[in-house]
């Protein structure tokens, strides 16, 4: 039995090492959120067992939780590099599949008349009226016109602290495209990681609740900045050493059990 108990420990240590290694590998990844492994013990017994005779038979991985604490803000100077100073996620929609994604990576560009990420997914905004007031809670593509009603060409696109996306034209006029649609979740730990700093809503996370920057619990918008990874390298290195010791201890337990078994075999021969 001790072999299987220690084998579980080795597998769990390997899982812990993999999670820490992934955190360290993404220490410089924009918008990355670190993860942590939680373990639970396994016991051999039933409700009828003598509680003084119930023994442990190892451990298992209970969950791998994501940590959505804020990462450091890095100044870039690019108008469409955005960071959320608070909770919430940027909302993106794929024009090909129609799927909705959520991210903390605010590295966007203007492409084909839309504000998009590196994969062509379109940033979502809330509709506004002529004076910039939000008129609905259903997100839509951040579409930026190449020319205004007077025929003047687009000059630049800026994003204000309240999330307003403003297009400026050569004739000196400006037009509000919408306000950045931020998504909040009841249980963000239930979001499904897709890679590329993207998440997808699940039954555990609950459906997204959309709002504008600065409203309710949503943070304000920082233009010309990106949110860095929230990985603390020093903390991860300490965790790495602990996980290594954990692995070594379980390997030693297997080695000791092997020696005991060999001794018993030798006694019988």
Image (cartoon, rainbow, N blue to C red):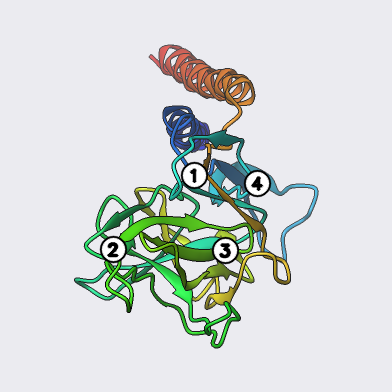
Report the residue marked by disc 2. 153
CA gap between label 4 and label 3 equals 21 Å
Report the residue marked by disc 1. 31
In depth, the one of 260 and 212 nearer the eye is 212
Question: In percent of the image, x 67 and y 59: which residue is there?
Answer: 219
Estimate the x, y position of residue 141 in percent, counting from the top left: 36, 73
Nearer the observer: mark 2 or 4; the answer is 2
Report the residue marked by disc 3. 163
Report the residue marked by disc 4. 69
**Mark 4 vs mark 1: which is more N-terminal?**
1
CA gap between label 3 and label 1 equals 18 Å
In depth, the one of 152 and 30 nearer the eye is 152
**Mark 3 vs mark 1: which is more N-terminal?**
1
**Mark 2 vs mark 4: which is more N-terminal?**
4
Question: In percent of the image, x 47 and y 16: which residue is there?
Answer: 255
Nearer the observer: mark 4 or 3; the answer is 3
**Mark 3 vs mark 2: which is more N-terminal?**
2
- State left or right for residue 255 relative to residue 152: right
Label 2's element?
loop
In depth, the one of 107 and 173 nearer the eye is 173
CA gap between label 2 and label 1 equals 33 Å
Q: Quadrant of residue 49?
A: bottom right
Q: In this view, which residue lies farthest toward the right?
A: 52
- State left or right for residue 113 relative to residue 75: left
Badge 1: how crowded within 10 Å, few (<14), some, or many (20+)? many
CA gap between label 3 and label 2 equals 23 Å
Question: In percent of the image, x 45 and y 67: which residue is there?
Answer: 173
Estimate the x, y position of residue 74 in percent, counting from the top left: 55, 34
Question: In percent of the image, x 70 and y 71: which residue is there?
Answer: 215
Nearer the observer: mark 3 or 2; the answer is 2
């Amino acid at each position: 039995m001790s072999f299987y108990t220690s084998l579980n420990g080795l597998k769990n240590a390997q899982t812990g090492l993999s999670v820490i290694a992934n955190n360290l590998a993404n220490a410089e990844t924009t918008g990355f959120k670190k993860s942590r492994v939680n373990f639970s013990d396994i016991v051999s017994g039933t409700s009828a067992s003598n509680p003084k005779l119930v023994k442990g038979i190892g451990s298992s991985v209970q969950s791998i939780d994501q940590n959505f604490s804020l990462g450091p803000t890095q100044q870039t100077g690019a108008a469409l590099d955005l960071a959320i100073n608070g909770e919430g996620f940027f909302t993106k929609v794929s024009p090909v599949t129609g799927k909705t994604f959520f991210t903390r990576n605010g590295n966007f560009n203007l492409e084909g008349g839309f504000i998009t990420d590196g994969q062509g997914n379109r940033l979502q905004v809330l509709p506004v009226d002529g004076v910039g007031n939000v008129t609905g809670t259903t997100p839509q593509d951040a579409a930026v016109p190449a020319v205004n009603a007077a025929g003047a060409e687009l000059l630049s696109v800026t994003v204000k602290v309240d999330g307003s996306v403003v297009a400026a034209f050569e004739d000196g006029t400006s037009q509000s495209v919408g306000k950045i649609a931020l998504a909040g979740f009841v249980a963000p730990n239930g979001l499904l990681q897709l890679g590329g700093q993207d998440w997808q809503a699940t039954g555990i996370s609950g459906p997204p609740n959309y709002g504008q920057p600065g409203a309710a619990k949503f943070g304000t918008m920082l233009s010309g900045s990106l949110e860095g990874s929230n990985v603390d390298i020093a903390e991860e290195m300490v965790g790495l050493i602990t996980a290594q010791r954990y692995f070594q201890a379980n390997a030693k337990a297997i080695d000791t059990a092997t020696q005991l078994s060999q001794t018993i075999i030798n006694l019988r021969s």
